[in-house]
Image (cartoon, rainbow, N blue to C red):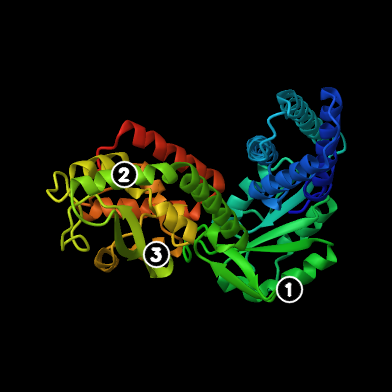
């Protein structure tokens, strides 16, 4: 449902924001007595565009709800502040004045808050005084039609006119010629200013659509069809077009199937894993390696083939926490397992044994966040007894995941616990966002500091 507001947000606001960003840059340089630096201006603009793309600030999805737009703007501003400070740090410009940072982000925040507030006031004023709401009617007194009507009622820029031929006992019958009642109500709706008529029909009534379209054309009503698959297909399903011609129904939400989603997740993985490798593993790896060698003979790293995305095996890396044994590829670690060394127990309890997997993330075999990968033998075992177990393999496995931060980690003593883990993994896959990944990372750190009961 494209409106002028969505158009403005998607095409005009980005230009205005960039102009404001540069004006605030120049103003901050002037206040602090600095000469405008072209290098910082270019970097600042690129960082803003990167953040806006990462948080979908100007996308159609975000612009549909003002709170999403405001939230995206706030997140982009915070990310811009962090990345710009990191850039200054890496350029080793020790003389760069902190006052510039304070003035720039202080003024920028005030301007964004003000412009967003003014935009909201203008929108509400137009809606109230000029009644710019688009009138919508719904034909189809079924489950999908009622849900659609409830959705329209909750949209500030839309006005729900009502149902066409709304009758609890005699529902709209599109299986033949249109009744006089349907035709008269369509005429009344058009006369009342309705421009769009959403028709919710079941698949067995699709044959009568041409007659309905003919009558709607006479009344100057735009007809939009919302298929009613209640009882046939589980919701939510999505409909897209292959080659712009063939309608395709997808039965599962999968944000990471889209190129933009995969790009954002890969960018997050590369940045995060690089920072961990450079600033943490560079000094932590040698320390842990020495402790492991002192405890027991064998390699520092434990390599094991595990199931990855699309069930493709990969070599998963961990700090070795057990003595070298022949059952490592078959038997899960249990509480009080005699194979676990003293340093290994600490590594498992603190989750430090998983740190080498950031190399897997950097190489593209894993993600920072995702379903935990299983041994190949366990994948074969669980796929045979747990429904939807293999669905979790549509995405890359992760170092941590939604299931793990909700307590489903470690040994799976019974099928029920694995089923819960799978449910959480599928929920994550269907509801993925960059901010959900950030939330899971924070929850993982908190759980690691507190210590987890199932970490052994």
Mark in the foreground, 2 or 1:
2
The earlier-in-sequence mark between 3 and 2 is: 2
Q: Where is mark 1, residue-wise?
A: 211
Q: Secondary structure at mark 2?
A: helix
Q: Quadrant of residue 316?
A: bottom left
The earlier-in-sequence mark between 2 and 1 is: 1
Q: Where is mark 2, residue-wise?
A: 288
| Quarter of the rendering occupied by the N terminus | bottom right
- Between the residue at mark 3 and the residue at mark 2, the CA separation in whole angstroms equals 27 Å
- Between the residue at mark 3 and the residue at mark 1, the CA separation in whole angstroms equals 51 Å
- Between the residue at mark 2 and the residue at mark 1, the CA separation in whole angstroms equals 75 Å
**Circles 3, 2 touching at the beta carbon (< 8 Å):** no
Q: Considering depth in this image, is 384 or 65 the residue closer to the camera?
A: 384
Q: Secondary structure at mark 1?
A: helix
Residue 84 placed where, x, y %?
68, 38
Q: Where is mark 3, residue-wise?
A: 308
Q: Is residue 385 above or below residue 108?
A: below
Judged from this view, the residue extending furthest toward the left is: 338
**Circles 2, 1 touching at the beta carbon (< 8 Å):** no
The earlier-in-sequence mark between 3 and 1 is: 1
Residue 132 placed where, x, y %?
83, 43
């Amino acid at each position: 449902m494209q409106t002028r507001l969505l158009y403005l947000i998607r095409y005009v606001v980005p230009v205005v924001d960039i102009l404001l960003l540069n004006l605030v840059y120049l103003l901050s340089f002037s206040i602090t007595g600095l000469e405008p630096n072209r290098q910082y201006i270019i970097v600042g603009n690129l960082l803003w565009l990167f953040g806006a793309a990462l948080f979908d600030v100007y996308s159609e999805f975000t612009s549909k709800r003002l709170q999403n737009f405001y939230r995206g703007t706030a997140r982009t501003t915070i990310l811009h502040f962090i990345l710009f400070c990191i850039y200054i740090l890496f350029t080793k410009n020790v003389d760069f004045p902190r006052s510039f940072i304070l003035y720039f982000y202080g003024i920028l925040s005030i301007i964004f808050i003000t412009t967003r507030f003014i935009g909201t006031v203008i929108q509400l004023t137009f809606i109230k005084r000029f009644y710019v709401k688009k009138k919508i009617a719904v034909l189809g007194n079924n489950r999908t039609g009622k849900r659609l009507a409830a959705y329209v009622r909750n949209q500030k820029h839309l006005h729900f006119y009502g149902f066409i031929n709304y009758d609890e006992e005699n529902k709209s019958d599109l299986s033949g010629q249109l009744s006089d009642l349907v035709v008269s109500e369509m005429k009344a709706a058009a006369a009342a200013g309705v421009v769009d008529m959403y028709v919710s029909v079941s698949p067995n009534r699709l044959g009568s659509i041409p007659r309905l379209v003919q009558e709607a054309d006479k009344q100057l009503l735009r007809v939009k069809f919302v298929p009613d698959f209640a009882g046939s297909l589980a919701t939510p399903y999505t409909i897209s077009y292959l080659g712009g011609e063939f309608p395709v129904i997808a039965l599962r939400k999968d944000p990471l199937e889209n190129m933009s989603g995969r790009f954002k997740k890969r960018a997050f993985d590369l940045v995060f894993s690089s920072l961990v490798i450079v600033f943490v593993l560079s000094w932590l790896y040698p320390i842990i390696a020495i402790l492991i060698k002192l405890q027991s003979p064998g390699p520092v790293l434990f390599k094991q083939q595990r199931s990855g995305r699309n069930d493709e095996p990969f070599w998963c890396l961990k700090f070795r926490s057990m003595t070298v044994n022949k059952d490592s590829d078959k038997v899960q670690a249990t509480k009080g397992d005699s194979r676990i060394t003293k340093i290994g127990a600490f590594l498992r309890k603190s989750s430090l044994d998983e740190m080498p997997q950031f190399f897997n993330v950097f190489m593209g075999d894993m993600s920072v966040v995702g379903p935990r990968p299983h041994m190949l033998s366990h994948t074969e075992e669980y796929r045979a007894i747990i429904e939807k177990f293999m669905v979790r393999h549509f995405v890359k496995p992760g170092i941590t995941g939604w299931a793990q931060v909700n307590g489903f980690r470690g040994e799976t003593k019974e099928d029920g616990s694995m089923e819960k883990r799978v449910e959480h993994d599928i929920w994550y896959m269907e509801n993925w966002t960059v901010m959900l990944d950030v939330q899971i990372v924070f929850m993982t750190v908190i759980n690691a500091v507190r210590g987890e009961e199932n970490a052994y």
